[in-house]
Amino acid sequence: MTLPWYRLLRPDLGEGTPVTLMVVQVAPEYYEHLGAVAAPDGRRSRSGYLDAVLGAGTSEKALKDIVGVTVRVRADRAKRLAATLEAIGFSCTGEENVLAGPDVTITLVVDETAPEGVVAMRNSLRVPWEHGTQRFGAGCALDADGWAFTPYRWAE
């Protein structure tokens, strides 16, 4: 059986961008195939997908979902990112460069000199985090609040 899996949107962020944004909308048929339960309002969520795959409330995994992403970009890319996110239903929160969508908030940090990239991801957890700060190399750390990253500058 062949099922449609997702629809993919990848906006143009300009020439030479080190940042790639891919917005994936999972097809309802795929959610149904997995047994993911829709919310009372009919919306299907990433959390519902994860519950179907990992088992709702039964997983020993600490991570429930990613609820926030912070991206550092140049001003022109921030405008393109914001326009794309708004076009697919994200809305301004009232804070500068912060956009809210279903189950996730995207924060755009505008910086014209520092390396561009994802600098943080905020988590929601299934169980309390009891592992302190875990470091993965020089530029990645995980703690109770989520992931922190140090983007590096690609050779030009």
Image (tube, rainbow, N blue to C red):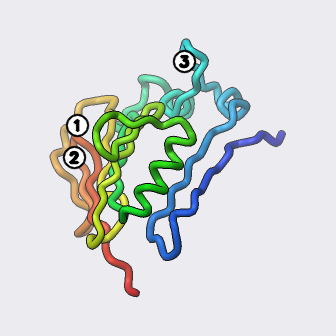
CA gap, disc 3 and disc 2: 29 Å
Relative height, residue 79 to residue 37 (above, below): below
Percent x, y for residue 83? 50, 49
**Residue picked out by circle 1:** 129
Dot 2 lies on which element?
Answer: strand
Q: Which residue is mark 3?
A: 39
Answer above or below: position of 37 versus 121.
Answer: above
Disc 1 secondary structure class: loop
N-terminal of the pair, mark 2 or mark 1, is 1
Amino acid residing under circle 1: Trp
Mark 3 or mark 1, earlier in chain: 3
The residue at 53%/49% (across/down) is: 84
Residue marked by disc 2: 143
Residue at horizontal 68%, vertical 45%? 7
The picture quadrant where one finds residue 37 is: top right
Q: What's the amino acid at mark 2?
A: Asp
Q: Where residue 61 appears, x then y in whole percent?
A: 37, 37
Where residue 5 appears, x then y in whole percent? 70, 42
Q: Does residue 55 sit above or below 70 in this rendering? A: above
Res 66 visible: no
Front residue of this view, candidates 60 and 46: 46
Element type at marker 3? Answer: loop
Q: How many marks?
A: 3
Query: Pointer 2: residues within 10 angstroms few (<14), some, or many (20+)?
Result: some
Residue at 17% of width from left, 50% of height from top?
Answer: 133
Pointer 2 with pointer 1, Cβ within 8 A: yes
